[in-house]
Image (cartoon, helix red, strand yellow):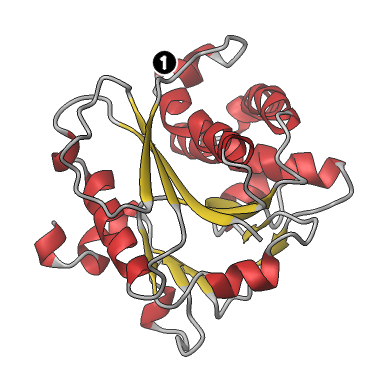
Amino acid sequence: MKNAIVYSFHLRNGNLKDLHCYKQLRYSIDTLRKFNIDIPVYVYISPSSIDTSSLGFDKNVNIIKFDIENDGGWPEDWVKEGYLEFLKHRWQNAINSIHSYKLDNILYLDTDTVFYSNPNILFEKYGSTKHLWAKPDNSNDLMTKVEVWPGMNDGQFILSKDLASNDIMKHMKFYVNHTLTKNKNKLTEQEYGNLSWVSTQYAVWDYFQNLNNPVKYFDENEVMLHTEPHYKDTSNLILNHYYNGNTLLFLPKEYQ
C-alpha cells in the first residue's frame, strides 16, 4: 500500500512560525520521525502567499500551499464567523491528496497530535478496508440534542482511495446548511457555536451513514483523544489527538 500522512491548516494573519498550529506541527512530525523516517507527509498551508522556504522539515515532508475558496452555497453566518476558513479545506485536501499523489490511504491529522508508535500499524490494520476509520466524537450533550450518535471526531482519520469522492464535499455543504438551520432555535448561542465547529465532521459521518457504510472506529487503546493518555493504559498507544486547549500540557517547552 502507498500511504501518507496529511495535515492542513490556515493562517489568518501574523507570522507562520508564531502560530500554534505550526508549533504543534513541528512536534507532531518530530514524534512521527522517532518511529518512521520514510512515510511521506503532505502539509497543506493557506494562504499561498506564505513564505515556507525556511520551515526546515525533512525531505519526506512536502509543503503544498493553497488558498481558501468559497464556492458558494454555505451558510452566510457560518462563513462570516470563519468556519469555512478553518474547516472545509481539511476534507477537501484529504481527498485531493489521494488523487494528486496516487495514494492508497492517508492518515489525516490535525496538528495537535502526538505519535507514540509507528503509524504503519494503523495502516496495516485499518487501511484499504472499504471503511472510513476515525474516533467517536465526545461532545455527548451536543450530539444528544442534534440527534447524532456516536458521530465522529475528524482530527484523525484514515481515508482510502476507494472512498475519496468529492461527493463527500457536496453532502457536507447540504448537511452544514441543514443541521445549522434545523437546530439554531433549540440551542444556546454557545451550543450553536459548538455545532458550527463540528458540523463538517458530523456531515461526513452522516454521508457514510447514508451509504449504509457507517464510520468505523479505531481501537480505543491505539488512538486516543484529549487527556486520555493521562489515565488510560498506553501500552498499545500509537496516536493521541490532544486538542488545542491542552497544548501546554502536551507540547514540550522547546516547541512553545
- For residue 228, what is the image quadrant? bottom left
Residue 78 visible from this viewpoint? yes
Query: What quarter of the picture does the C terminus occupy?
Result: bottom left
Query: Which residue bears the numbered disc 1?
Result: 80
Q: Relative to residue 245, is residue 71 depicted above or below?
A: above
Residue 139 visible? The answer is no
As displayed, is residue 33 above or below residue 13? below
Q: Position of residue 206 (x, y in %)?
A: 75, 41
- Return the x and y of residue 49 as percentages of the image width and height: 26, 19
23 relative position to 199: left or right: left
Residue furthest to the left: 254
Between residue 161 and residue 145, name the one nearer to us: 161
Q: In the displayed structure, would residue 235 be above or below residue 216?
A: below
| Of 9 and 221, the residue lying toward us | 9
Residue 164, x across and y down, in percent: 70, 40
> Where residue 154 sits in the image (x, y, percent)?
55, 50
- Give the residue drawn at x 69%, y 57%: 150
Q: Is residue 87 left or right of residue 12?
A: right
